């Protein structure tokens, strides 16, 4: 990091995902990236290895001294204290109970007060609202599909965590479906597990989607089961919140044209209202939204417990 002073209007962002970490510098005067973006894989292993990957991505972004950091990260996480609440044995379980603010500050050589945290799906929705697919919407919702299911809800430019019909904290991954946590039906792990059970093969979701496009019955059956379930679970939530638009993002959104008919089947089975939808494959939406979260005084969710994948 440079020793020069930070110009006003710059926020450095670290977006932590299930398999990669991304960093960039955002110019909040124009709401655009102020330089190149770095994307690095997150290794499996020790807490030090994971934290070193986070810090390596952050150091790759040229940040003047005194630049504020906004870190977008999945829950369960104590966003106020900067403490990881991930389930031991799950994704990022090696960070469970760790003061991530202090650990990052030590690696980056900055005061802990320079680092703030926000929820990754909320950062995605804020980015889409500030300068993306849902700009200007009065009420909007987001769904991010990757390792797990992320969600966020926005009304009049403010994040909503409590509303009749929403799950606790507005977290869709906490919903139950047929008596079990939703992520046991629809998640990266659930889809892979279902395909392995039918075929004996261990493929990732993108490969399973590719096989479904060729008409393979096993791939089609697994995806229909998962995403029909997603439609059933989401229908009453969206009917209760009644957004003007729903934006879908995350790595699996690249296959949304394939999955949308299955979601529609679930929605029809639930017989509930459904908002217009749009898909955002903007890889930088969460970076812009995390910077907006830092400067706009948006509320942070409170820790609300573990999902089945340690989200």
Image (spheres, rainbow, N blue to C red):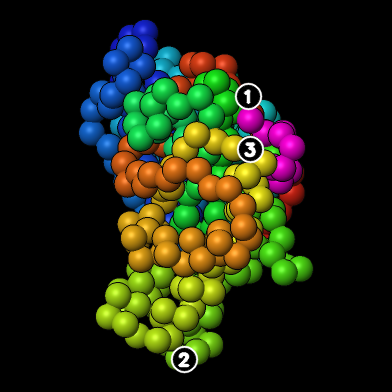
> Predominant secondary structure in magenta?
loop
Residue 161 on the magenta span: yes
- Give the residue number, with chain letter if any, for mark 2: 200
Q: Position of residue 211 (x, y in %)?
A: 32, 79
* Residue 54: quadrant of the picture: top left
Q: Position of residue 104 (x, y in %)?
A: 52, 35
Measured Cα–Cα span from mark 3 to mark 2: 41 Å
Measured Cα–Cα span from mark 3 to mark 1: 18 Å
For the question of whether residue 6 can be seen, the reply is no
Other residues around mark 2 within 10 Å, as few (<14) / some (14–19) / many (≥20): few
- Give the residue number, with chain letter if any, for mark 1: 299
Q: Which residues are magenta?
A: 160-168
Other residues around mark 3 within 10 Å, as few (<14) / some (14–19) / many (≥20): some
N-terminal label among 3 and 1: 3
Left or right, residue 279 beside residue 113: left
Numbered disc in front, either 3 or 2: 3
**Foreground pick, 225 / 202:** 225
Other residues around mark 1 within 10 Å, as few (<14) / some (14–19) / many (≥20): some
**Foreground pick, 130 / 67:** 130
* Residue 228: quadrant of the picture: bottom right
Q: Decide: marks 1, 2 in contact (CB < 8 A)? A: no
């Amino acid at each position: 990091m440079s020793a020069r002073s930070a110009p006003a209007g710059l926020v450095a962002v670290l977006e932590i995902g299930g398999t990669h970490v991304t960093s960039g510098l955002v110019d909040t005067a124009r709401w655009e990236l102020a330089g190149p973006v770095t994307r690095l894989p997150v290794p499996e292993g020790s807490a030090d290895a994971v934290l070193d990957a986070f810090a390596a991505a952050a150091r790759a972004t040229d940040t003047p001294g005194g630049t504020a950091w906004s870190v977008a990260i999945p829950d369960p996480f104590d966003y106020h204290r900067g403490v990881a609440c991930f389930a031991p044995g799950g994704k990022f379980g090696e960070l469970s109970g760790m003061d991530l603010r202090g650990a990052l500050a030590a690696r980056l050589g900055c005061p802990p007060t320079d680092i703030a945290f926000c929820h990754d799906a909320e950062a995605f929705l804020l980015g889409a609202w500030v300068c993306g697919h849902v700009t200007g919407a009065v009420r909007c919702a987001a769904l991010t599909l990757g390792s797990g299911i992320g969600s966020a809800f926005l009304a009049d430019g403010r994040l909503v965590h409590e509303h009749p019909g929403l799950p606790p904290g507005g977290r869709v991954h906490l919903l139950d479906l047929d008596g079990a946590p939703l992520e046991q039906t629809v998640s990266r792990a659930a889809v892979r597990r279902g395909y392995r059970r039918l075929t004996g093969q261990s493929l990732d979701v993108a490969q399973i989607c590719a096989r479904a496009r060729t008409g393979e019955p096993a791939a089609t059956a697994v995806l229909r089961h998962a995403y029909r379930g997603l439609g059933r679970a989401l229908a009453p939530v969206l009917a209760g919140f009644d957004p003007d638009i729903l934006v879908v993002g995350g790595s699996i959104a690249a296959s949304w044209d394939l999955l949308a008919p299955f979601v529609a089947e679930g929605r029809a089975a639930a017989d509930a209202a459904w908002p217009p939808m749009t898909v955002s494959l903007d890889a930088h939406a969460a970076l812009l939204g995390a910077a907006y979260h830092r400067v706009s005084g948006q509320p942070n969710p409170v820790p609300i417990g573990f999902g089945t994948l340690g989200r």
